């Protein structure tokens, strides 16, 4: 039996249409949600991501501002720009595209962003609030995964969710969101021995490690939901996820294609966070 290949396009376009309506309502009150994206250097993949974020913003009727800085920009200049954006009432969300050049501290940059404008949910205050279940922005990729699961009707409560990867951007916040949804959660990583024994227990398997085709059929329980967060450029120039799609597709119950679902859904949550940050400024 072949898995249901999750149709990200349908899910994403319905979600974005809803966001657009809310943006229009807010504009009637004189507030246009605004997102500022800062990118330093010329990493081609990062430039593609930033372009996609700006385009999605414009399509949703939001203000989009991209600040492209050269690789050699001193940290003090990046911090000064963030200071200006923090004080700019047209801007409700600030995102500094990662990775930054080595001479710039990601930690100092993220901590400089106003907590209320941190639409990535990277600021330590927002990460702490996430941990204790307080209101705040959603971590974009993990929240996008939860929304996809809900949209396709997957029950999360009581299920065993296994997350492969422990990054601050995906693995760790993904585990927290699954706990919030009442799943039993296991996190695997590069030091986990016999990983397939654990991943084979997953009702829901989320993979975010950045290793092309790491997950093969022997890692997957028949009928499991497999969400692939990986985005790897192969030597052939083609994109591949962390899951070997062709090998897993007839074992899984549901599977996400790469590219096409998690990436666009991540941007959709970014739009939602920006909209909500703007809504909070309305009285
Ligand atoms: N680089 C890769 N993913 C992300 C993301 O979600 N946000 C930011 N700021 N940088 C990234």
Image: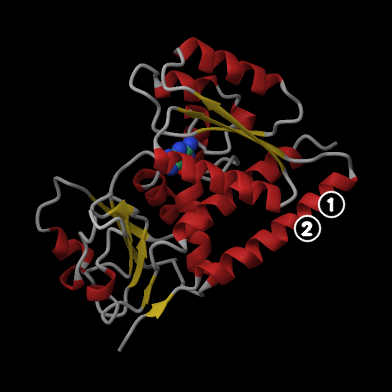
Q: Which residue is mark 2?
A: 21
What label sits on residue 25 in the rendered view?
Answer: 1
**Residue shown at 22%/61% (left/top)?**
213
Q: Quadrant of ligand 1?
A: top left
How many residues crowd mark 1 within 10 Å: few (<14), some (14–19), many (20+)?
some
In-front residue for pair 188/231: 231
**Residue shown at 58%/41% (left/top)?**
137
Q: Is residue 37 above or below residue 208?
A: above
**Residue shown at 24%/67% (left/top)?**
244
Can residue 131 be spotted in the picture? Answer: no
**Residue shown at 29%/70% (left/top)?**
245
- Left/right placement of residue 229 relative to residue 147 reads left
> Pointers 1 and 2 in contact (CB under 8 A)?
yes
Q: Where residue 252 sits: x, y (%)?
A: 30, 77
Q: Is residue 237 above or below residue 204?
A: above
Q: Quadrant of the C terminus?
A: top right
Q: Is residue 18 above or below residue 63?
A: below
What label sits on residue 186 in the rendered view?
Answer: none
Q: Quadrant of residue 20?
A: bottom right
Label 2 residue SS: helix
Label 1 residue SS: helix
Q: How many marks?
A: 2
Can residue 105 be spotted in the picture? Answer: yes
Distance, label 1 to label 2, CA atoms, is 6 Å
Furthest-front residue in this view: 236
Q: Where residue 242 sits: x, y (%)?
A: 27, 58
- Left/right placement of residue 228 relative to residue 63 reads left
Q: Quadrant of the N terminus?
A: bottom left
């Amino acid at each position: 039996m072949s898995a249901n290949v999750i149709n990200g396009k349908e899910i994403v376009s319905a979600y974005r249409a809803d966001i657009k309506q809310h943006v229009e309502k807010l504009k009637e009150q004189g507030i246009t949600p605004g997102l500022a994206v800062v990118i330093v250097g010329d990493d081609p993949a990062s430039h593609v991501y930033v372009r996609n974020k700006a385009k999605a913003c414009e399509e949703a009727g939001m203000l989009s501002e991209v600040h492209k800085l050269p690789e050699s920009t001193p940290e003090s200049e990046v911090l000064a720009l963030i200071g200006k954006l923090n004080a700019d009432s047209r801007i409700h969300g600030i995102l500094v595209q990662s990775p930054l050049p080595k001479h710039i501290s990601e930690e100092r940059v993220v901590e400089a962003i106003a907590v209320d404008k941190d639409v990535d949910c990277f600021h330590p205050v927002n990460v702490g609030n996430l941990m204790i279940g307080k209101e705040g922005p959603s971590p974009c990729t993990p929240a996008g995964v939860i929304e996809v699961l809900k949209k396709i009707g997957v029950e999360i409560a009581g299920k065993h969710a296994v997350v492969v990867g422990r990054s601050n951007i995906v693995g760790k916040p993904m585990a927290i969101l699954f706990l919030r949804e009442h799943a039993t959660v296991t996190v695997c990583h590069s030091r986990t021995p016999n990983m397939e024994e654990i991943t084979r227990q997953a009702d829901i398997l989320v993979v975010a490690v950045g290793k092309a085709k790491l997950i093969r059929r022997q890692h997957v329980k028949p009928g499991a939901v497999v969400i692939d967060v990986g985005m790897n450029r192969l030597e052939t120039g083609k994109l591949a996820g962390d899951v070997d799609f062709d090998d897993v597709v007839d074992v899984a119950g549901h599977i996400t294609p790469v590219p096409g679902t998690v990436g666009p859904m991540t941007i959709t949550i970014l739009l939602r966070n920006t909209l909500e940050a703007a809504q909070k400024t309305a009285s």
